[in-house]
Image (cartoon, grey):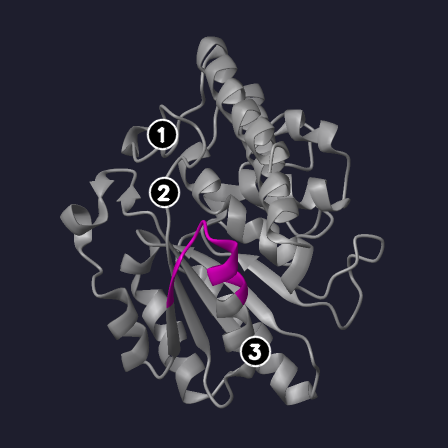
Amino acid sequence: MNNLDLAKTANEVRKGIVTAVHSAKAGHPGGSLSCADLMTFLYFEEMNIDPKDPQKKDRDRFVLSKGHCAPALYSALAQRGYFPVEELTTLRKLGSHLQGHPCMQHTPGVDMSSGSLGQGISVAVGMALSAKLSNDSYRVYTLLGDGEIAEGQVWEAAMFAGHKHLDNLVVIVDNNGLQIDGKIEDVCNPYPIDKKFEAFNFHVINIDAHDFDQIRAAFAEAKNTKGMPTAIIMKSIKGKGVSFMENQAGWHGKAPNDEQYEVAMEDLKKVGEALCQK
């Protein structure tokens, strides 16, 4: 896809996020919106996947380590054709396969159940090691929150990945600078994130999370990096695309009411109209 089509699709992913969280009256819109461009790129360009065969053996794997941002994953999967977009309104409802955190047993396209922060990257490292041991060609991608990387288990997994030279692994950190309690540097400062991953023998790339040229170049660079895993640190805007949610920690885990939902959808409608003029 070209950048304009990716941007249009990402905007639809954002609409799905807002719609799902509003319908559920609960969820995590801020961090879901910040990673929507990344999720769109992964599922529409980067990964070897097939919505008609979600379990195909050679598919690339994705683990949403920051599992509370399931609305972003679900919306991307729906747009990609894994299940109808209309099902996003069943988020967190009794009997729905779209619960508050991803469940691999019930949701097509979900490769790993996640939600306990820090654990997703460990599973992704295991998947990447398995591919190496089996001489399989698939690649493994995992997305972490910048607040999540305060978990010690993240660095145990990173140390192991670097030691095992897992060049089929890409770790992405959504660096929107905010977590549930406020600014990440005030809660438990993780900076410099890039230098930490470098210390664990990762190839590190810093990008703008909302620039598709930079996203595309980073993943191409990751594929060309041999002998070590890659960490992509993407600087993002929490709540991206919704005026009153952008850079507001209060929208980490809160659903918009009906009036706020209308404003949010109008914001995204305007973004879509502007993209159509290009």
Q: Could you say where residue 188 lies in the image, as x and y percent from the top left?
A: 18, 53
Q: Disc 3 versus disc 1: distance between alpha carbons?
A: 34 Å
Residue bearing the label numbered 3: 223
- Residue at image x 52%, y 18%? 266
- Residue at image x 64%, y 63%? 46
Q: Could you say where residue 151 lies in the image, as x and y percent from the top left?
A: 31, 60
Mark 1: give few (<14), some (14-19) or many (20+) Cα within 10 Å. Answer: many
Three-letter residue code for mark 1: Trp
In this view of the protein, can residue 117 be seen by the observer?
A: yes
- Residue at image x 31%, y 79%? 198
Q: Quadrant of residue 138?
A: bottom right
Q: Are marks 2 and 1 in contact (CB under 8 Å)?
A: no
Name the quadrant of the N terminus.
Answer: bottom right
Q: Quadrant of residue 194?
A: bottom left
Does the magenta-highlighted stretch encompass residue 56? Answer: no
Residue bearing the label numbered 2: 237
- Residue at image x 66%, y 46%? 5
Residue bearing the label numbered 1: 251
Name the quadrant of the C terminus.
Answer: top right
172 displayed left or right of 244: right
